Image: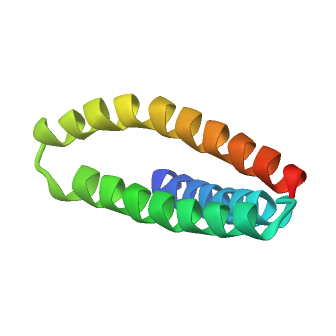
Amino acid sequence: MHPGWIGGIIGGIIGLAGGIIGTWFSIKNTKGPAEKAFMIRMAVYIWILLLLFLLLLLWLPRPYNFLVWIPYSIILPFGIRYINKRQLEIQQSEKKL
């Protein structure tokens, strides 16, 4: 087997494992039921969107597949900001109860 294939497979496995562990800790470290439900919902959305991104990256012919990076690089920071802000709001509302 070619070293590039081995590196790609090992890198993919490590990346997938990191995503699974990160998702698990994001859900595990929530402090209340509403926050946990929100994080589970966001995790499902993010995994679906990442899968769609990867499929488009692999499915579209070159050079069009590189255009998928444009919405990804715009949506990612805004999505992270929204999730962090909303999670903080949920934490604060659950502290009041």
Is residue 75 left or right of 14 when viewed as pictured? left
Instruction: Out of 62 and 35, give the one closest to the viewer.
Output: 35
Q: How is the image coloured?
A: rainbow
In the rendered image, residue 19, in percent from the top left (x then y), is placed at 64, 58
Instruction: Out of 15 and 50, give the one closest to the viewer.
Output: 50
Evaluate whether residue 1 shows in this view.
no
The quadrant where residue 84 appears: top right
In the rendered image, residue 14, in percent from the top left (x then y), is placed at 67, 58
Which quarter of the figure is the C terminus placed in? bottom right
Query: Relative to residue 52, is residue 65 depicted above or below?
Result: above
Query: Relative to residue 76, is residue 10 depicted above or below?
Result: below
In the rendered image, residue 37, in percent from the top left (x then y), is placed at 66, 70
Number of marks present in the image shown: 0
Evaluate whether residue 6 shows in this view.
yes
In the rendered image, residue 71, in percent from the top left (x then y), is placed at 28, 35
Query: Relative to residue 62, is residue 39 depicted above or below?
Result: below
Residue at 82% across, 59% down: 30
Taking the view exactly as shown, the residue that stands out farthest to the front is 97
Residue at 24% across, 40% down: 68
Residue at 72% across, 51% down: 90
Residue at 73% across, 56% down: 22
Instruction: Out of 94 and 32, give the one closest to the viewer.
Output: 94
